[in-house]
Amino acid sequence: MIGQQRLKRGVLVYVDDTMMSEISVVEDYKVVSEDTPDEDLRAMDKKMHNQYPVFLIGKRYGNRGLDYRAINNRLGICLII
């Protein structure tokens, strides 16, 4: 599902801590941390290698209060919980 969705829009996957350490969703995903630039999360409409980004976010940083955006993509983002 993630592979299909990232061809159309950025994907944000919310996982618990156990899943975070065991997950191997795709090869080039990024884990959201306190060091993740806000600009990266607000620009999920930018393709790299003909795919949109995949971010994994857990309980610790899931409440950052950021707006995950894809302004230039009419589909927005895909949120998987």
Image: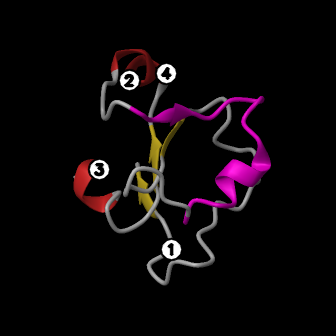
**SS category of the residue bearing label 2:** helix
| 62 w.r.t. 72: above or below | above
Residue 48 tag number: none
Work out whether mark 1 precedes mark 3 in sequence or the reverse, and give the earlier one.
3
Please rate how many residues cluster around mark 3, counting C-alpha atoms within 10 Å: few if below 14, some from 14 to 19, many from 20. some
Q: Which residues are magenta?
A: 28-45
Work out whether mark 4 precedes mark 3 in sequence or the reverse, and give the earlier one.
3
Q: Position of residue 1 (x, y in %)?
A: 22, 53
Q: Is residue 18 magenta?
A: no
Please rate how many residues cluster around mark 1, counting C-alpha atoms within 10 Å: few if below 14, some from 14 to 19, many from 20. some
Please state which of residues 62 and 8 is positioned toward the viewer in this rendering. Answer: 8
Instruction: List the residue tagged with mark 3.
Output: 2
Of labels 4 and 1, the one closer to you: 1
Q: Quadrant of residue 11?
A: bottom left
Q: Amino acid at mark 3?
A: Ile
Instruction: List the residue tagged with mark 1.
Output: 76
Work out whether mark 2 precedes mark 3 in sequence or the reverse, and give the earlier one.
3
Q: Amino acid at mark 1?
A: Gly
Q: Tell me: 37 left or right of 61.
A: right
Determine whether label 2 and label 4 are within 8 Å by CB.
Answer: yes
| 34 w.r.t. 50: above or below | above
Q: Main secondary structure of the magenta part?
A: loop
